[in-house]
Amino acid sequence: MATHDSSAGDGFVPFFRRYAKSWVHAVAAAGMTAFGTLTIVHRGFAVLALASYVVPPVVLYLLRTPIEGSDEDTATDRQHDAAAADRATDSGGGSLERTKGDTEAAAITEPESEEGTEPSRAPGSATTVSKEQRRDADPAAARETAADRAPQAERSRRWELVDVPTETTLRDVCVTETGAVYAVGDDGQVLTADPVDGDPAEREWMVALEDGPAAEGENLSGVDATAGGEAVWIAGDSGAVGRLEAETRRHTDYSAPAGITDNWPGVAVAGPNGDETILLINGSGDVLRGRYRDGECSWDEPVTPGSGSSLSGIALADASIGYCCDTNDGVFETTDGGDSFDRIGPVGAGGTLENLATLGRGDCLVSADDGVVHRYGGSTWTPERVGEEAICGIARREGETIVCDADGVIHERVEAEWEAVDTRAPESLLAVSVDADGERAVAVGEDGTVAERW
């Protein structure tokens, strides 16, 4: 029976990792370099160069000579080896690769200590920080943790391209709380699909509005729904604004609000049916706030959050909290439903800001045309590279973030990492939306391209 020697570090690999951090390795490497240089005099020095690097670790290992290093390095190496052994055990002694489901299940079921802190760390590492302390340090920490841990059952759903009754470009989409879908695009077209009931593959898309709220065929670029999904607001070029009732499919034209006929590239809505707050953005950097009460709609004077640069995205988490971004690296927060805004940028983006999504105060994700998403944690911005193409659409819910890009690729944030889904659209995708439960997600884009997840 072989004896176990703790000084050997349980094998050559952990031994060599400690050796590589020692002074002996540094001397051996210098010797190899020196003898290697002398090969210009005689090729025989190549043998000495190789020997000076290879012989020391072999001799030290065979003699079980302890390598000088920190306790932290040793503990870390042993933890690494133990983890490798566990992975080998999980795979039944065969391949060390683990399936995606195994990895996610391990992340979800990892036990916590009785005090509610993270698992213990190796000696010499940073002090353990409780989850409560981490939330105090970053107001969005708890929400961000949830967004990184979507259940595997949801990840098993697939994206599919679907046929819709149009070939015009669709520029925005909204999945309501009921699971119904509304998409808007060029020539004033508004498409809708009822909530899923039965086989998702049999869901039907139809035209809800043929030529815009004023029947003039204005291009539409924004759509959003009330909290219960009972009403939907649309907005677009030449001051086009309209409201659709989900149950009756009746629409009301509110174009040229406050007498303004600017193009409205985005709209955000909050509040329940009949008690609605509407925010519109334009290319002059203005936000126009509307209030819909008991069938009547009133509009305030527009406000300019930034320097007048074109606003590119707006979102409301509720009737009070919301964010908007412009093309000059500015992001602005409102806590009074769009009556006023405070600057929380600049983001420091290398590209132009495209769109944003939010779940509440201190939580905002902004996408840019250089393939980067910037995350706001209440005080600082953190960039996360997703791809190389412009990220035109972004959607967020508790447990998940989805983006789509100009190359027709959809990315989902899984376990704090971005992953591209298998389905790829043939055209650019411009917008994406997901309902609060993740039961339905839809992305839309050029030439009537629509991708759904089920």
Image: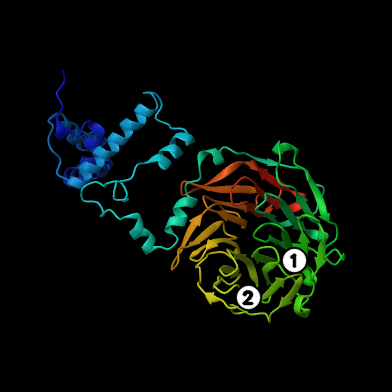
Q: Is residue 309 left or right of residue 248?
A: left
Q: Is residue 37 left or right of residue 437?
A: left
Q: Residue furthest front?
A: 294
Instruction: Name the residue that disc number 1 marks.
Output: 235
Q: Amino acid at mark 2?
A: Ser
Instruction: Name the residue that disc number 2 marks.
Output: 309
Query: Image quadrant of residue 226?
Result: bottom right
Residue 440: where, in percent of width, then height?
Answer: 64, 46
Residue 9: where, in percent of width, then height?
Answer: 19, 34
- Of the numbered discs 1 and 2, the one sitting upstream in the chain is 1
Task: Residue 35: tell me if it is visible.
Answer: no
Q: Residues within 10 Å of mark 1 (few under 14, many from 20)?
A: many
Q: Residues within 10 Å of mark 2 (few under 14, many from 20)?
A: some
Could you tell me which quadrant the N terminus lies in? top left
Query: Image quadrant of residue 161?
Result: top right
Viewer-nearest residue: 7 or 56: 7
In this view, 6 is above or below 74 = above
Q: CA distance from mark 1 to mark 2?
A: 20 Å
Task: Residue 82: tell me if it is visible.
Answer: yes
Residue 383: where, in percent of width, then height?
Answer: 48, 60
Question: Element under label 2?
Answer: loop
Q: Residue furthest top?
A: 1
In this view, 367 is above or below 439 = below
Query: Image quadrant of residue 47?
Result: top left
Question: Element under label 1?
Answer: strand
